[in-house]
Amino acid sequence: MPAREDGLDLVRALLAMALSGLPLSPRKIEDALGIGHGTLPRLLDGRMDLKLYHLLPLCAVLKIHPADLLQRGLPNWEATRRIDDWLPPDHRQTAQAPALSAEILEAIRTTVREEISRAGLTPGGERETTGRRR
């Protein structure tokens, strides 16, 4: 039977590569997934439908988030909307700023300290007097 034309070829290939990196035999992986022996190769080569109820346990075995797999496995998926576009306002996620690295945060702190010092401000918020009058 030829491979499926369902657009999941890259997802299957990524899963196959990742699962081969586990220190488990295919039989042990199948046992962990609760699927019959011989099923894993058929899921990964497209002879069997790869369904959500397969993907979630596979991601759990790999200890990855399903979104990670789907974003890498479906890179050209065209989406003009996000799920929040369809949800009522009280169920939408608030926009989150991207996390900054420790190095960037320290650079920001240093710059702010330098500017405060250059402006002549003290930690209490008052300006230091230089003895000059305007």
Image: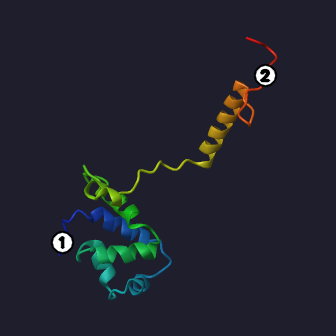
Q: How is the image coloured?
A: rainbow
Looking at the image, residue 26 sits to the left or right of residue 49; the answer is right
In which quarter of the view is residue 59 placed? bottom left
Q: Is the residue 29 above or below the residue 120 in the image?
A: below
Q: Which mark is residue 130?
A: none
Image spot of residue 69 (x, y percent): 38, 64
What residue is rendered at 69% in x and 31% in y?
A: 116
In which quarter of the view is residue 26 placed? bottom left
Please tell me which residue lies in front, 71 or 44. 71
Please tell me which residue lies in front, 39 or 62. 62
In which quarter of the view is residue 73 placed? bottom left
Image spot of residue 64 (x, y percent): 45, 68
Determine whether the residue tagged by mark 1 lies in a helix, strand or loop.
Answer: loop
Quadrant of the image for the C terminus? Answer: top right
Work out how far the residue at label 2 is from the one at label 1, CA to CA, in angstroms.
Answer: 82 Å
Tell me the kind of residue under disc 1.
Pro
Tell me the kind of residue under disc 2.
Thr
Please tell me which residue lies in front, 89 or 79. 89
User: Among all residues in the image, which is located at the extreme top?
Assistant: 134
Quadrant of the image for the N terminus? Answer: bottom left
What residue is rendered at 65% in x and 34% in y?
A: 111
Q: Is the residue 67 above or below the residue 80 in the image?
A: below
Nearer-N-terminus badge (2/1): 1
What residue is rendered at 47% in x and 80% in y?
A: 24
Q: Residue at label 1?
A: 2
Q: Residue at label 2?
A: 129
Looking at the image, residue 106 sits to the left or right of residue 49; the answer is right
Count of marks placed on residues: 2
Q: Are marks 2 and 1 in contact (CB under 8 Å)?
A: no
